[in-house]
Image: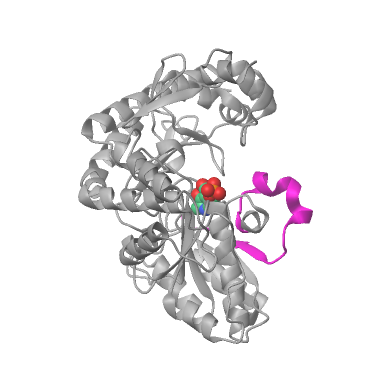
Amino acid sequence: MTDQLLLDHQYDQKAAAQSHLMPHFTKGTAWQAGNMAVIDRGEGCYVWDTDGVEYLDGLAGLFCTNLGHGRSDLTAAAMKQMDRLAFYPTWGTANPPAIQAATMIAERFPGDLDEVFFVSSGSEAVEAALKFARSYHVSQGDTERYKVISRNWAYHGTTLGALSVTGIPKFRKHFGPMMWDGVRHVRNTYGDSVPEGTPASELESIKAIEAMILAEGPETVAMISAEPVQNGRGAVVPPVGYWQELRKLADRYGILLHADEVINAFGRLGHWTGSERFGVVPDMITFAKGVTSAYLPLGGVAIRKPLVDALWESEMGVYMHGSTFGGHPVATAVACANMQAMTAEDINGHVLAHEDGFRARLDSVMAAHDCVKEVRGIGYFYAIELMASRAVGRKLNDAQVAELQGGLLGKFVRDARVLIRPDDRGATMLTISPPLVADNAVLDDLAERVSSALTMTDKYLKSHAC
Ligand code: PLP
């Protein structure tokens, strides 16, 4: 095949994908079956495949196309910067978009999270947080601190450091010998609550963290990592006071508190950060995805300034970490345009104004479908957990779980023309997280399409009841 034929799309794209394009997290057999959608074009909250089929982008790509598709202001920002200076590193030099993006982020993130270290993805952001925590402690003479406490079912990325922090068994399964031994996983906040009037310090999920710190020896613990709303296990919203207790634990034992906001930040919860929504200033916030609305890859970690100053003033003097593309001028120029547009269009206000209506639509969808166990989430970030029958209180049996998770749910959502995520992390669920620009018309359409996928699910479950 000539390059020209490829460039003119005069070839069988699905066959070429099967031959040459390796998919992420996708079974080889499913890929080789060749019925993948080839997504070709997008506009607002909708995308079209090469067969011309329209889908509602109910996952914002992968929690990241926050301003939606087809934003010419973001592409114009990229083109303008590419013409002026396509690349120069952030290694001893600076470039105007990187400076501007770091400043805009510092102004939008809470408290004194004023230093921004750029990388190119969420996993790299978590790696950077891990290495900063270790570097900071060593620079202060606390050389024993290297352990990290994170939570069951949490996803923090796939590179080996970040994968160690991830608490999802299937992602870790074959890589055990390659991962570092410093991470301890504890329970997350799913199903955790205390009676009204009882302090959050009595939460089992808080007690588990303190018990782990004490068991390991506080002097060995470098960092506590958690997402404000945890994606793995399905949009797990923390109980009131949880993050304040995390802050107190971190302060009590000299540990750095890391909020992994790769999904949560940049409007997903109606605020610049989930930390702001829950009223806490962590020591580090990792971000990626929505910082550019996914128009270009960019990630980073924002760090409290006194911590960076302390490291720089120490004998160590340098945070010994970096990468070629961290602070890439084109990616950071897009981040600036993205933040500017989010502010001008009050995207956070839009999410907050629509979140109750969004929730009410999903609650109605639940009421109409026997297979829905629970709807969880806030902002524009939800999970629908499934069961066999709510009416008779029956769980999914093993065969149903295997079939639904093995591709059937994926078929149902695709048949309903809605790209939401069939999720198997700890339960059988659908994860929903539309672009933040979704308005009432889109939310109505989304609820209708989700409802259609659940009608197919109900029908399947009724015909495969035992
Ligand atoms: N951390 C969290 C909380 C995430 O949700 C993700 C990805 O979904 C990551 C880290 C890894 O990000 P990336 O896929 O950009 O490496």
List x then y, in percent, for residue 397.
59, 31
List x then y, in percent, for residue 466.
58, 23
Q: Nearer the viewer, residue 100 or 166?
A: 100
Q: How many marks?
A: 0
Q: Quadrant of the N terminus?
A: top right
Colour mapping: one colour
Q: Is residue 156 visible?
A: no
Report the residue at 46% width, 48% height from top. 86
Compared to residue 215, the image places residue 390 above or below, namely: above
Drawn side of residue 452 relative to residue 231, left or right: left
Q: Please tell me whether residue 32 belongs to the stretch shown in magenta.
A: no
Q: Is residue 77 visible?
A: yes
Compared to residue 403, the image places residue 69 above or below, namely: below
Q: Nearer the viewer, residue 357 or 23?
A: 23
List x then y, in percent, for residue 272.
32, 57
List x then y, in percent, for residue 122.
52, 52
Q: Give the quarter of the image for residue 132.
A: bottom right
Drawn side of residue 45 relative to residue 13, left or right: left
Q: Nearer the viewer, residue 392 or 251?
A: 251
Compared to residue 78, the image places residue 387 above or below, namely: above
| Residue, far front | 84
Residue range corresponding to the magenta coloring: 165-191
Q: Give the quarter of the image for residue 382.
A: top left
Q: Please tell me whether residue 173 belongs to the stretch shown in magenta.
A: yes
